[in-house]
Image (spheres, rainbow, N blue to C red):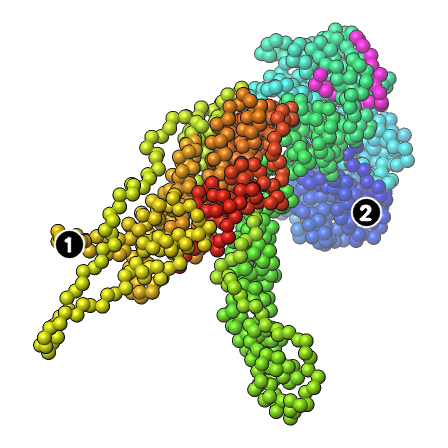
Amino acid sequence: MQMLTKFESKSNRVKGIAFHPKRPWILASLHNGCIQLWDYRMGTLLERFDEHDGPVRGIAFHPTQPLFVSGGDDYKIKVWNYKTRKCLFTLNGHLDYVRTVFFHHEYPWILSASDDQTIRIWNWQSRNCIAILTGHNHYVMCAQFHPKEDLIVSASLDQTVRIWDISGLRKKNAAPSSMTFEDSLHRSATAQADIFGSTDAIVKYVLEGHDRGVNWATFHPTLPLIVSAGDDRQIKLWRMNESKAWEVDTCRGHFNNVSAALFHPRQELIISDAEDKTIRVWDMSKRTLVQTFRREHDRFWVLTAHPELNLFAAGHDNGLIVFKLERERPAYAVHQNNLYYVKDKYLRVYDFANASDVSVLSVRKIGGQYVHPRSLSYNPAERAVIITTPTDGGTFDLFHLPKDFSGEPREVSTDGKRGTGNSAIFIARNRFAVLDKTRQQIEIRDLSNATTKSVKPPATVNEIFSAGSSNLLLLSTPTSVILYDIQQRQTVAEINTPPVKYIVWSSDHSQVALLSKHTITIANKTLEQSCLIHETIRIKSGAWDDAGIFVYSTLNHIKYALPQGDNGIIRTLDQPVYLTKVKGKNVHCLDRDGKTRIISIDPTEYRFKIALIKRNYDEVLQIIRNSNLVGQAIIAYLQKKGYPEIALHFVRDDKTRFDLALECGNIEVALETAKAMDRDDCWNKLGAEALRQGNHMVVEMAYQRIKNFDRLSFLYLITGNVEKLRKMLKIAELRNDNMSRFHNSLFLGDVEERVRLLKEVGQLPLAYLTARSHGLTEEAESILTSAGLTAEDITDLPTAGQLLKPPVPIIRQHDSNWPLLTVSRSFFDSAFTNTDNNPLAAPLTLAEGIDDIGGDWGGDDDLGLNVDGEKVDDQRVEGEVVEEGSGWDIDVDLNVQLDKEIAKELANGAQGEFIPPTSGTNESELWVHNSPLAADHVAAGSFETAMQLLNRQVGAVNFEPLKSHFLKTFQATRTYLPCNVTLPPLVYHIRRNPEETETRRMLPVLPHNFQTIISVHLQEAYRTTTAAKFQEATIQFRNIIHSILLIAVSKKSEIDEVHQLIEVCREYIVGLSMEQTRRRFTLDDPENTKRALELAAYFTHCRLQPAHLQLSLRSAMTLSFKAKNCLTASMFARRLLELAPPPQVATSARQIQKIADNTPRDEITLDYDQYNPFVVCAISYTPIYKGSPSVECPYCHASYLTEYQGKLCTVCDVSQIGANSTGLKVYV
């Protein structure tokens, strides 16, 4: 038996102690009058209570209420509320020191014992004394209630122990009920007897046997036994029945006054402490001394036991000590799906799968009655176990398990299979290692317990653990853990840690958790540390989750630890448990009674975090959508790790959403929440971020909300918004803000306003100079006249001045934003956004349509990887051919003139003369005059002016590809009505704004509609790309680019979408052209292989839709892996995983990544730098890195090397590379 100290405090002499029944608290009443409340788990002082005058000897918690009671040498009993930290009331009545105080377990009573030779019972609700027990003729040192019956035991210096019957008091104070006739007679007789003395509490027994005063007496929790301790240095055991009480035996051994004695709540033991500075443990049945624990300088004064836990506390001269008398951690070992553990002297096997629990062996012969096994090691090959116990300085026993676990557990013999050692573990099929701490020797033994080898460790070793190999051991020293090779007798690796008590290997033995008292060190199999976790309370156990997360338990929590050091709480525990296995949402564990338990947990939080760390974004997205993962902790974690866009998904609080939106640059959400809060500080922050991004429309709104007029004026100046500048001038005038008026007039170049303002504020010299400098002669003379001066009086005018006149804005961009700063959008931004709202988004998500991918994209089924996935179908879809123009057979008589009308004869009957009507303006000519769009000129038939416009706007020089579009546009704007056979048909012009009556606004209908292009033609091109029909897709994207030249949009907001569509088509044409070029290479030649790898790599940098970018990355990854460019293949795999591909694709990518990580090198050196931003030349298909000279196509903005300037763009096939242009116009 050993004393396991759990907590020690240093203070003045402790005279009274009490455990809280539920919380890890202990009260200590001190000789100096102070009461201390300690948390013995955390080792912290929670509160001090200082109202007693003099020593406080009695202290007790209420079993259910937030109360405690104290009694001291000031004769007072005080009742406290520990929640409010105040004394509720004081009970006065005792005439001398109060020795002990206790609450009744059921009634609102307090029992107190005093040096005034009385015992009092108080009702703490009515705050009255309800009974006084007299009979002792010396100090009453102790009085306690029986835990179940209506009895009280008291101990006094009159050398007696008295048992009191308080059943009468209970009946008297019980709730009213119907009484029989006999009860009423008894009640009246009781009232008459009170004249002579109280009958509520009567002495039942007087126990005499101590030779000197008795200091303590207490009941057994369940048996009719009493233990008492006195100044005669003896501990006496008494038994009682209904009629008598008698002494059973005496325990002798203390050599000074015995302060207290009590029964062990779970075993047949008596524990006592005394002024001889010892705590002694006695066998209750044999009345013999079992163990003695001695302190050097401290006398013990009080002793108590926890009402529920296996804990004891003793108060001494310099504080208190909380301790246990036995190790409660069960010895266990886990192998695969079985748990081997010792409970109640039996070795048991628990099956995690079917929850069967059977006893296998009886191990009663090992250890002793009060000694529990310390550790267990299991050998699956030989079905053997080693059990280590601390008996005789440490012993081990080797057992062989029966083949069949059914039937009664059998007794085993340990003859020849027992030895001395502090630690014993299996290290091979037929070998185990034993540590002898005393001699510092490690012995290797076989299964017959014969020593085969002895090893001297390189340092002082406390424990040995398995290292997963037959020739390796982990040695725990006071400052480190050593990986030691037994064969070579040398240290392989060493890691500095506090003293390690336990280790837990992951299932694949790739990681190990080293558990110390307050730290966890996680390392790999070569002891390279990955993280160190500190806990303020004791760490008890741990187990690895299937996902590689370490789940561990402390005294009151189950927690998790991620490999990079993050940790958190999974759930709270009522009592400590010892984890054995973590499977999904269940944690298998053993409690302190050795019972197997299954605790349900929610692993969402740590699985979310590990998926985020591993960039497994598909799992992250699934967890977000399917779980209720909320809370400030997870939001703070996401912010800390740089994922504010995910945190934004969880938050509902406007202020937090606003801050997160600003952090990730999401102006839309920030604007929405700023409107909801409408606070000046939020508008200021929003204005600053919007200005940084170039969104001056939001900046304007923010400045307007906070009435920042000066900044508004400057914003209107730089955006060329003259109309609003004039409004700002008017507002400044209404506000009587002269400085603002001057600034606004200066911004507007309004000289008259500046002169008027300077005159109003009395600055006539400045007004005169302003008027004179700007040629306002009459105004200048009037100023001189009003000042009583003439022009001759002004002699010192400056001559080198310049006019303060702002430049006239050329491009007034107040109705649209500047080019916005690119804000990087993560995978989650697109995932959280409904793609239906984006007309340019591809409709395909590969998770749903992976079977529709064309075979020419290339699969990964021939890589030799064990990936379960369907082969990609390579069958082409028929009928997907781009409809070309119907030819050039167009009617040449389209421009037929209208027939002339015949004028009526004059009404006066004069001789008729034929007067032809005046010819009106042809509507086609009106279209040409009304619109600057090339499409409208083509519709009017003015092809030449249309070509001139396209040349100026987009640098067009090759109109051959546009011929069919020109004719289609022209033909679509007219309808023909046949007349007589000999007459040409009537021609009617079709307008796109038929309701318009103003001739200056009439415009033709156009066949190419922007919404049709993006909803039909673009989606068709996407589908063709997915089907790997690269040549057809290239034609379709180029056809869209040609169509855009002849469209008109109805809203300004669509202009940006047009440019975005051009950019999409350009990226696809360049990328698909490179892919077609790559496929023409034969991979027999190393140069061809190198070029093919480069083109595949460049293709992955084209800005494609996520679905197609996944395909390009898969193709590049596969090609690189086949060419043994493992480093590049790993990079493509990582990028592919960031896009959340389908599970089978993700599995393949992870396998490639794993293989590549083992051989991180490239066989072929490529002209490719993924970390340096670049664009691809659309002719040479070579990278143009950032900062290198290049030229662009003025229409599609495809990039080229400077040597190709002046040539025809190969992307749009229309414009000249590097030509000057004004930009395409699509809006009137």
Q: Position of residue 640 (x, y in %)?
A: 65, 44
Q: Is residue 1041 magenta?
A: no
Q: In the rendered image of this protein, does residue 168 appear above or below residue 876? A: below
Does residue 273 appear left or right of residue 828 in this picture? right
| Quarter of the image where one finds residue 599 | top right
Q: Which residue lies furthest to the bottom in this view?
A: 788
SS type, badge 1: loop
Q: In the rendered image of this protein, does residue 1041 appear above or below residue 753? A: above
Does residue 897 appear left or right of residue 862 in this picture? left
In front of the other: 650 or 195: 650
Q: Where is residue 381 in the image (x, y as percent from the top left)?
A: 65, 11
In front of the other: 490 or 568: 490
Whole-Å distance between the Cαs marked 2 and 1?
Answer: 127 Å
Q: Nearer the viewer, mark 2 or mark 1?
A: 1
Neighbourhood count class around disc 1 (C-alpha, 10 Å): few under 14, some 14–19, many 20 upward: few
**Pointer 2 or 1: first along the chain:** 2
SS type, badge 2: strand
Q: Which amino acid does label 2 sit on?
A: Val
Q: Position of residue 728 (x, y in %)?
A: 54, 72
Q: Which residue is drawn at 64% across and 22% down?
A: 508
Which residues, given as a range, are shown in magenta? 451-469
Q: Which residue is drawn at 58% across and 23% down?
A: 1086
Q: In the rendered image of this protein, does residue 412 appear above or below residue 578? A: above
Question: Which residue, given by chain and number where applicable, does mark 1 sit on?
Answer: 983
| Quarter of the image where one finds residue 1133 | top right
In front of the other: 585 or 308: 585
Question: Which residue, given by chain and number where applicable, does mark 2 sit on?
Answer: 56
- The answer to whether the residues at label 2 and label 1 have Cβ atoms under 8 Å apart is no
Q: Which amino acid does label 1 sit on?
A: Leu
For the image shown, how many numbered marks are present on the structure? 2
Q: Where is residue 1076 in the image (x, y as percent from the top left)?
A: 47, 31
Does any portion of residue 336 appear in the rendered image?
yes
